[in-house]
């Protein structure tokens, strides 16, 4: 009897350098490729107080369209469903007689729990999970996962002793799909649009080639903290987050660039930031639910609370701080914000607005086109002082940040940072205006 496999794409939406897909597809006679749009969980709904934006869904749509185009060239197709993963997979098992289920190893504890729930719910099926999202595999690590250093620097020094494996070639062929009807993609996804950024594997490869054919990598450290501009950022994070591009592909392109143009502090800094991403990935796997805990598992809770009107101002970009407003306007419109901008916006929420950092992290989760559970929540804990930072958090002087990174006000003007400035606490708990 022929075996029928179900491969669940998630943060690995590519055919090149996808070891999990390559290994799994070799185990089955027929293959169904699935992406599941899972409903927002109660934790995210409570803290974000919103749902995925059109810009975020539009970027995901483009990512999935390009993945489907790649699969079509291999006589395959991508099925996109919406709903609880266990229920969706259960229906596929029943309708298509699935015998094998595969995916890439997830970083987040809740994604891991779903994977465990699938195995518990369907004990007769064979399950496979492979590493596809990180520079190194679990067996590559120079320490046990439970012994991961509590801060980045000692981990980085150990990471730098490791050799990055070369990126694998694209999967040359895939097993055919069973002859069954393919349902339309979810309407909410197809209606979404992002006119600022295009996701997907083809776009990722083109951008990677374009970036490393310029001189921008040699100047990266000097430009990386800018808020906007031409090639000031690598703009690779969205592709990485959805797995349209693997970190090993970036390292391969970086090595070719350094061989042709020479290595310097800027080219090293690109790898340095990939190591930060790597640290957050393994930290998420090691720390589990502590990644979402108010005190980060440190036992030292921040001196913050929740003020609905302040959070609303921050989300809408109507705080007393023009730079923060501009940053939030860009995020809401495009789904993206510079690295420096994220630090400024997060510091404002935690320090100036005295808000529980989890509200900000959850809001970013529903807006960022490059949302990555490990990097997003890890960076927010870093700012709040409950994460991988021995110095205990970051508090940015907003006025100095504006003077340094937007001295002429070009960024604030570009994103209308002064248009909606309002004083804090201008309304009471039921949104009635307060007197002077």
Image (cartoon, helix red, strand yellow):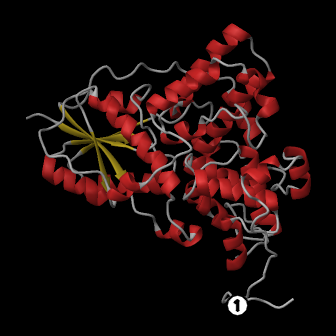
Residue at the image point whose x is 49% and y is 21% from the top: 167
For this view, does 19 lie left or right of residue 163?
left
Residue at the image point whose x is 71% and y is 64% from the top: 317
Q: Position of residue 59 (x, y in %)?
A: 48, 46
Q: Is residue 147 above or below residue 356?
A: above
For this view, does 236 lie left or right of residue 192?
right
Closer to us: 234 or 259: 234
Where does the C terminus fall, quadrant-wise? bottom right
- Residue wearing tag 1: 432
For this view, does 109 lie left or right of residue 237?
left
- Residue lying farthest top? 260
Q: How many badges with numbers are in the image? A: 1
Q: Is residue 239 above or below residue 60?
A: above
Where does the N terminus fall, quadrant-wise? top left
- Residue lying farthest left? 1
Q: Is residue 229 above or below residue 350?
A: above
- Which corner quadrant of the image does residue 313 belong to? bottom right
- Which corner quadrant of the image does residue 416 belong to? bottom right
Q: Position of residue 375 (x, y in %)?
A: 62, 47
- Which corner quadrant of the image does residue 310 belong to? bottom right
Closer to us: 328 or 269: 328
Residue at the image point whose x is 36% and y is 52% from the top: 190
Q: Secondary structure at mark 1?
A: loop
Q: Position of residue 174 (x, y in %)?
A: 26, 27
Is residue 125 visible in the rendered structure shown here?
A: yes
Q: Residues within 10 Å of mark 1 (few under 14, many from 20)?
A: few
Is residue 381 visible in the rendered structure shown here?
A: no
Q: Position of residue 421 (x, y in %)?
A: 79, 69
């Amino acid at each position: 009897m022929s075996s029928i496999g179900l491969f669940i794409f998630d943060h690995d939406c590519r055919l090149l350098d996808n070891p999990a897909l390559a290994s799994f597809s070799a185990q089955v006679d027929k293959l169904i490729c699935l992406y599941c749009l899972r409903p927002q969980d109660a934790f995210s709904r409570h803290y974000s107080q919103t749902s995925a934006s059109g810009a975020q869904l539009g970027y995901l749509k483009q990512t999935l369209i390009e993945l489907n185009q790649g699969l079509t060239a291999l006589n395959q197709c991508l099925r996109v469903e919406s709903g609880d993963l266990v229920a969706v997979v259960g229906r596929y098992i029943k309708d298509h007689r699935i015998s094998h289920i595969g995916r890439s190893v997830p970083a987040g504890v809740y994604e891991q729990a779903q994977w465990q729930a699938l195995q518990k719910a369907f004990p007769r099926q064979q399950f496979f999970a492979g590493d596809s999202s990180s520079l190194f595999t679990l067996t590559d690590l120079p320490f046990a996962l439970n012994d991961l250093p509590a801060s980045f620097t000692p981990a980085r020094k150990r990471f730098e002793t490791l050799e990055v494996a070369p990126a694998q070639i694209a999967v040359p062929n895939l097993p055919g799909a069973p002859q069954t009807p393919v349902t339309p993609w979810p309407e909410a996804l197809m209606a979404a649009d992002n006119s600022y950024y295009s996701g997907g594997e083809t776009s990722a490869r083109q951008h990677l080639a374009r970036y490393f054919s310029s001189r921008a990598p040699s100047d990266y450290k000097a430009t990386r903290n800018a808020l906007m501009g031409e090639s000031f950022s690598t703009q690779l994070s969205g592709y990485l987050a959805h797995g349209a591009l693997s970190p090993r592909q970036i390292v391969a392109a970086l090595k070719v660039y350094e061989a042709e143009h020479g290595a310097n502090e800027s080219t090293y800094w690109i790898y340095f930031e990939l190591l930060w991403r790597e640290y957050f990935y393994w930290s998420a796997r090691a720390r589990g639910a502590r990644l979402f805990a108010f005190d980060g598992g440190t036992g030292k809770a921040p001196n913050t609370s929740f003020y609905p009107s302040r959070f609303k101002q921050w989300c809408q970009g109507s705080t007393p701080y023009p730079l923060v407003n501009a940053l939030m306007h860009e995020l809401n419109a495009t789904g993206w914000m510079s690295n420096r901008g994220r630090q400024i916006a997060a510091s404002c929420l935690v320090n100036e607005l005295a808000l529980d950092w989890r509200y900000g992290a959850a809001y970013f989760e529903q807006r960022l086109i490059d949302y990555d559970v490990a990097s997003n929540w890890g960076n927010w804990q870093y700012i709040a002082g409950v994460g991988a930072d021995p110095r205990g958090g970051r508090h940015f002087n907003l006025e100095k940040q504006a003077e340094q990174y937007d001295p002429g006000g070009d960024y604030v003007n570009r994103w209308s940072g002064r248009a909606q400035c309002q004083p804090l606490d201008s309304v009471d708990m039921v949104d009635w205006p307060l007197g002077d």
